Image (cartoon, rainbow, N blue to C red):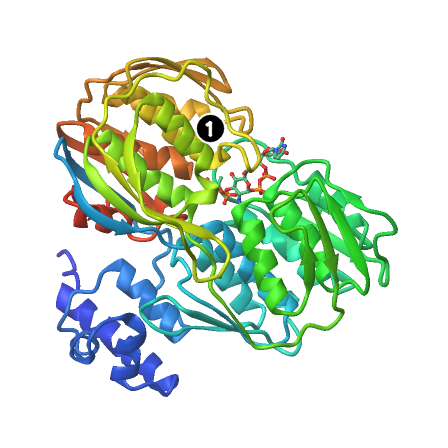
Amino acid sequence: MAESLPRTEDYLRRIGTLIRDARKHRNLTQAQLADVLGTSQSAVNRIERGQQNISVEMLTRVSDALDQQIVSLGQPTAMHLRVRGGSRLSGSIDVRTSKNAGVALLCAALLNKGTTTLRRVARIEEVHRILEVLHSMGVAYRWLNPDNDLEIVPPARLRLDAINEDAARRTRSIIMFLAPLLHDHPEFILPYAGGCDLGTRTVEPHMTALRHFGLSVKATTGEYHATVDPGRGPSKPIVLTERGDTVTENAIMAAARFDGVTIIRNASSNYMVQDLCFYLQKLGVAIDGVGTTTLTVHGRPVIDRDVDYAPSEDPIEAMSLITAAIVTDSEITVNRVPIEFLEIELAVLEEMGLDYRRTEEYLAANGNTRLVDITVLPSTLNAPIDKIHPMPFPGLNIDNLPFFALIAACAHGTTTIHDWVYDNRAIYLTELKKLGAHVTLMDPHRVQVDGPTRWTGGEVICPPALRPAVVILLAMLAARGNSTLRNVNVIHRGYEQLAERLSLLGAEIEIVTGG
Ligand SMILES: CC(=O)N[C@H]1[C@@H](OP(=O)(O)OP(=O)(O)OC[C@H]2O[C@@H](n3ccc(=O)[nH]c3=O)[C@H](O)[C@@H]2O)O[C@H](CO)[C@@H](O)[C@@H]1O
Ligand SMILES: C=C(OP(=O)(O)O)C(=O)O
């Protein structure tokens, strides 16, 4: 006879008991936990008594709030989106803070012996991965409230031997542990290095830059074996061989605790690098040249200060939301757009015929980044005359390029998109063909897009890359009828509740799990 399965109510009761026990263990009242989760005390009470369905996302939030995994989900549950496209969106939406500043600041918090409080951090998978790794090394963290403020308290001594290898291998950002660790650890092993499947991404520039600080790294299968020659520092300006973002951040973090002055040339001046510099300045590290390609860092061997920092809004999320408006031919206001990091994108869009309004500039909470609210208006677009290609800041952002393939598919004429940066990213844009677009892969780095497209609904499996996955989702919003985007977990790596937030603008998106 077949064994009967436990009923849903039994599962909910068991999960509720686990949550209640973990909460009591942390000495929190139901009201305090509710506060952190952004829900009511009565909702927590119902969850603990097994009387309320609990989503995977809420379970993750509870686990974060209580610093304890409530249930092991094994492989993340497959999540899919059913989209009913073709209708216009309306309303306004706020841009959230960036993934890339978030992960850099979490790594940089290791430089500080004091408590770091980061405001409005994006609650995305990439941030969760780094937090898991930090936690395994003895760093305590706490989400403080529903606004996503996050407190990070480092231990007196990191437990590098206890590092959560599985989490570490699932994020490429772990590479930004190299610089913070080299200051206090003459020898360490770091598991590496995941991320999107975008082809080979060199780590050589990181090694070259950090060699100036005595770091040498031997890469074996899946691990960096690092040794540090203590007391070494740069005897001449460091010239980065690539103007990469994370390599610049590693060089800055190494310089931040070096007892002397470091000059970094060919530095990236991109948004996440600027956020890192502003954070370090609050910690007392003087940095000249922020926003330029030559940085002069006046290091402080000991950094021990309680600090509060608010990273700026994400230009890539802003571009994603502007694209949502363009492809659905809608009027949407995107609030808190970090305009200085989208100027080229907007200039290109204007050339293509985009009609939009923008407010006066105002400052982000970090006191530096210039923001505007942008209202996108329905427009007839034409293909640009020249190819569209990215460049390190202040060029068109490398991560914004995929959105231009989608916009080109809505425009009249032929556009060439040249992704010289990533070996494997342009190829994913051909998935748009499944929704009716005319996209031709000319070589691994270039696609030709012929528009405008008569979008049709379809079923697509998410490509294993964040931005192309979002591009497909946005195309589905434009396609009349039903579409399904399968395995969307990759989107959660960089966007917080994107489907839910697009739904608030009128998008018809249903989240389904399993199978
Ligand atoms: C956590 C984070 O901040 N990630 C961003 C960061 O990754 P990150 O800084 O790690 O980017 P990489 O260093 O991997 O650079 C991306 C690719 O561009 C090449 N390259 C880069 C700069 C350059 O001057 N010349 C050159 O050839 C690299 O060899 C590599 O193949 O920058 C990428 C490029 O903007 C973005 O897509 C990522 O979202
Ligand atoms: C490629 C990206 O980021 P990462 O460096 O985290 O892989 C991205 O944000 O699109």
- Residue at the disc numbered 1: 425
Q: Residues within 10 Å of mark 1 (few under 14, many from 20)?
A: many
Q: Residue at x 29, y 71 (%)?
A: 37
Horizontal side of 380 relative to 273 (left or right) equals left
Q: Quarter holding the C terminus? A: top left
Q: Quarter holding the N terminus? A: bottom left
Horizontal side of 302 relative to 39 (left or right) equals right
Q: Which amino acid type is marked by label 1? A: Arg
| Front-lying residue, 321 or 356 | 356
Q: Is residue 481 visible?
A: yes
Q: Residue at x 68, y 58 (%)?
A: 287
Q: Position of residue 310 (x, y in %)?
A: 46, 63
Q: Residue at x 49, y 35 (%)?
A: 397
| Front-lying residue, 331 or 20 | 331
Horizontal side of 60 relative to 271 (left or right) equals left
Identity of the residue furthest to the right in this view: 235
Q: Position of residue 14 (x, y in %)?
A: 23, 73
Q: Kindly indicate the quadrant of the structure image that contains residue 420.
A: top right
Q: Is residue 300 above or below residue 479?
A: below
Horizontal side of 68 relative to 293 (left or right) equals left
Q: Position of residue 2 (x, y in %)?
A: 14, 56
* SS under mark 1: loop
Q: Residue at x 62, y 40 (%)?
A: 244
Q: Is residue 269 above or below residue 310?
A: above
Q: Position of residue 224 (x, y in %)?
A: 69, 50
